[in-house]
Structure formats: structure tokens, C-alpha cells
Image: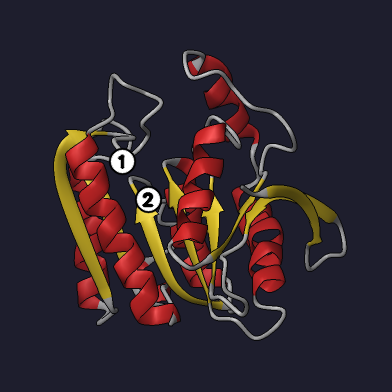
Amino acid sequence: MGTSISFKRPDGKEAKGYLANAQAGNAPGVVVIQEWWGLQEQIKGLADRLALAGFDALAPDLYNGVVVPYHDTDAAGKEMNSLDFMDATTQTVRGAAQYLSRNGAKVGLTGFCLGGAVTIIGSCKIPELKAAVAFYGIPPEQAAKPADVQVPLQGHFANRDDWCTPAVVDAFENGLKAAGKSAEFFRYDADHAFVNEQRVSVHDREAAELAWGRATAFFKKHLG
């Protein structure tokens, strides 16, 4: 459904990504951020789903062409740990947001796992955004504080998650409330990465569909 494109970062460098356009013109945009596996076909499929829901969706390739097989957690960890999260967010992800907003469209940001953490950093540091939805990922406090969030934020988290733990989620949510931010967090009795239908060991269809419906409704509310 979509296609591979190149777009400019604010620093002038080129980045690549997967773009899926809505059927209607002048659609609002959503930037979609990969898990720690890279720009997998499953993430492209989510961009396609967003396009069918009425959004222009762009998934930037933060690993520059590297896609890690789902079983190779060591390689995925190495790729994630070598990623400059601030550069990825303020340059590549912001460039994607600027691309989608170039004709005046409102733009949101969503991401999964690694991409959830990038989404929260982006909600603090990308001025083009109007809303953000994070799935089971929260960055370290030095990267993004709850008080620095600038847009309405929705979060979806798993109760069985050793990476983005319930305690971390609770602390960030409490920080958002204390700062008076517009935020809503949902928790699911599921495992980390429960939206990913290609990983049958963790996928929870009921939780995934509930979270997806909430996310698309949130974007329609804030992006039009």
C-alpha cells in the first residue's frame, strides 16, 4: 500500500522511511516509530492501517536499513544501544513530522517499545506535533521529564513488562498529573509488545485492538 521515500532532516541530511497515504487529500499525519527490531514489515503494516483510518503515516527508518530478526534479541539490543536517541528524535523524527506537516496538516507521533520512548521524547522536543501516543516505552528521566511534555499524550502499557515496568509507568504518570499535563494512560493484562501480531508468543489480539481503537480515536480528536 505504501512506498519508500526520502525526506530531509532539519540539519539537511537525508533520511528514509515508509509512507502510506490516506485516500483523501489534505489528511492529518502520524509519524510511526519502530520497535528495537528496526523498520519491520509489521510496522509498515501499522502505517498502512493508519492510512486506511484516514491519516498520512510515515515510518522513518531509524536504523538506516538494518532490520533485526525477531529471535535475535542480542542484535536488537546492540542496535538500540548504538542509536543516538536525541539525534533520532530531534532530527530524523522531527524531519518526518515536518514532511507530513508541509502543507499545513496537523501531525501526531506514535511508537512501540523503543519507539514508545522516542515518542515521549518527541512530545517534549518536536514543536510540529499536536498529539502523541506511546506504546510500552518510556525514556530515562534525563531524556524527557513529565513536566516537559508539550502535547496531549496517550499511553498503552503492559502489566507484564520487564523493560517498561509498571513501576516506571506509574512514576511517569504521577509526574504528568503533578505537572498538570493532558495525559491518559491505559494498562493491559498482557506482555510487552502485545500489539505485534507477528510475535505470537506475546501478541494479545483483544488488548491490541482495544489499544488501537483508543489510539486512532485520540488522533482523530486532536488532529482532525
Residue 26 drawn at (x, y percent): 61, 80
| Label 2 or label 1, whichever comes before in sequence order | 2
Residue at the disc numbered 2: 138
Evaluate if marks 2 and 1 touch, with contact meaning CB atoms under 8 Å apart.
yes
* The quadrant where residue 224 appears: bottom left
- For label 1, the crowd category at 10 Å Cα-Cα, with few meaning under 14, some 14 to 19 and many 20 or more, is many
Residue 99 drawn at (x, y percent): 71, 69
Q: Residue at x 40, y 56 (%)?
A: 141
Q: Which disc is residue 154 wearing?
A: none
Q: Which disc is residue 164 wearing?
A: 1
114 vs 57, nearest the viewer = 57
- Note whether 49 is above or below 75 in the view shown: below
Q: What is the spatial separation of the Cα atoms under label 2 and label 1, in whole angstroms?
A: 6 Å
Q: Secondary structure at mark 2?
A: loop
Report the side of 28 relative to 155 (left or right): right
187 vs 210, nearest the viewer = 210
